[in-house]
Amino acid sequence: MRLTGKTAIVTGGGSGFGAGIARRFAAEGARVMVADINMDAAQLVAEEVDGAAFEVDVSQNPSVANMCHVALETFGAIDILVNNAGITHLPMPMEEVPEDEFDRVLAVNAKSVYLTARHLVPQMKKAGRGAILNIASTAGLSPRPNLNWYNASKGWMITATKTMAVELAPAGIRVNALCPVAGETPLLGSFMGGDTPENRARFLATIPLGRFSTPEDMANAALYLCSDEASMVTGVAMEVDGGRCI
């Protein structure tokens, strides 16, 4: 029960890594808001963890502002924020990615971190504590061709994490990132350019441990970084990637 008495928001919590993190946080004693653009998915996970569900588009300021307002009204304070919601564009040459897809990737993967900070950091500063976890990617550390703008958005998130960590440390707020390799999530097929046995084998050959990241892998790492056990850890981009970045 390492998160007893803590409250958390997990964006993109209705599926994949976010759902795994929400489940683990709740099992460790936290009260969790499961926020997702898919309200049905958010409600299913929230019911499972006895938490709150909220429909949010993390790229839109009014939606994020409303999420944070409701979370603060519901829980009184937010101790942990997990910026997990993310999207990608399909693999293709960088110059062929449509402008609207580029805009959407940067809005969901990068602008969302700015928006949640705008609305939650003031409350965390007032409380003198808080843990923010940004779900980045190995793509931000070891980029692959044809996912250029997705890679760039995750590189942005890693740099933002380190900058936030330095600025917010005096306020007692820790900021870290996780960098998973692709996992069994709704985005897997997009990363691979189609979920086929051949593409899976090709992708797995790049991971020394020979498997994808799982929601449980991410939940274990997230639990540590957001718990008081990591009270001296801030500004790290932890690889949960089976050795891919070596």
Image (cartoon, rainbow, N blue to C red):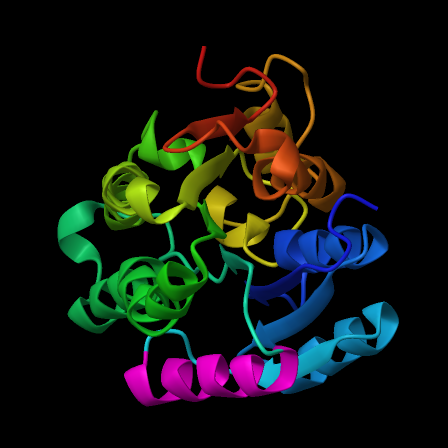
Q: Nearer the viewer, residue 24 or 172?
A: 172
Q: Is residue 65 magenta?
A: yes
Q: Nearer the viewer, residue 195 or 182?
A: 182
Q: Residue at the spot x=57%, y=49% of the render?
A: 188
| Residues shaded magenta | 60-75
Please tell me whether residue 14 is drawn above or below residue 76 in the rendered image. above
Q: Residue at the spot x=31%, y=62% of the render?
A: 105
Along the horizontal axis of the image, is 227 left or right of 168? right
**Most common secondary structure along the magenta stretch:** helix
**Residue 15 appears in the rendering:** yes
Q: Residue at the spot x=86%, y=71% of the render?
A: 48
> Based on the displayed image, in which of its 4 quarters is residue 117 positioned?
bottom left
Along the horizontal axis of the image, is 156 left or right of 16? left
Q: Residue at the spot x=68%, y=77% of the render?
A: 42
> Based on the displayed image, in which of its 4 quarters is residue 144 positioned?
top left
Horizontal and vertical percent position of residue 114: 27, 63
**Residue 144 appears in the rendering:** no
Please tell me whether residue 202 is drawn above or below residue 25 in the rendered image. above
Along the horizontal axis of the image, is 216 left or right of 208? right
Horizontal and vertical percent position of residue 237: 42, 30
Please tell me whether residue 62 is drawn above or below residue 46 in the rendered image. below
Horizontal and vertical percent position of residue 100: 22, 73
Rendered-image quadrant of the C terminus: top left
Residue at far left of view: 95
> Based on the displayed image, in which of its 4 quarters is residue 162 positioned?
top left
Q: Is residue 193 magenta?
A: no
Horizontal and vertical percent position of residue 34: 65, 72
Q: Nearer the viewer, residue 68 or 87?
A: 68
Along the horizontal axis of the image, is 5 left or right of 155? right
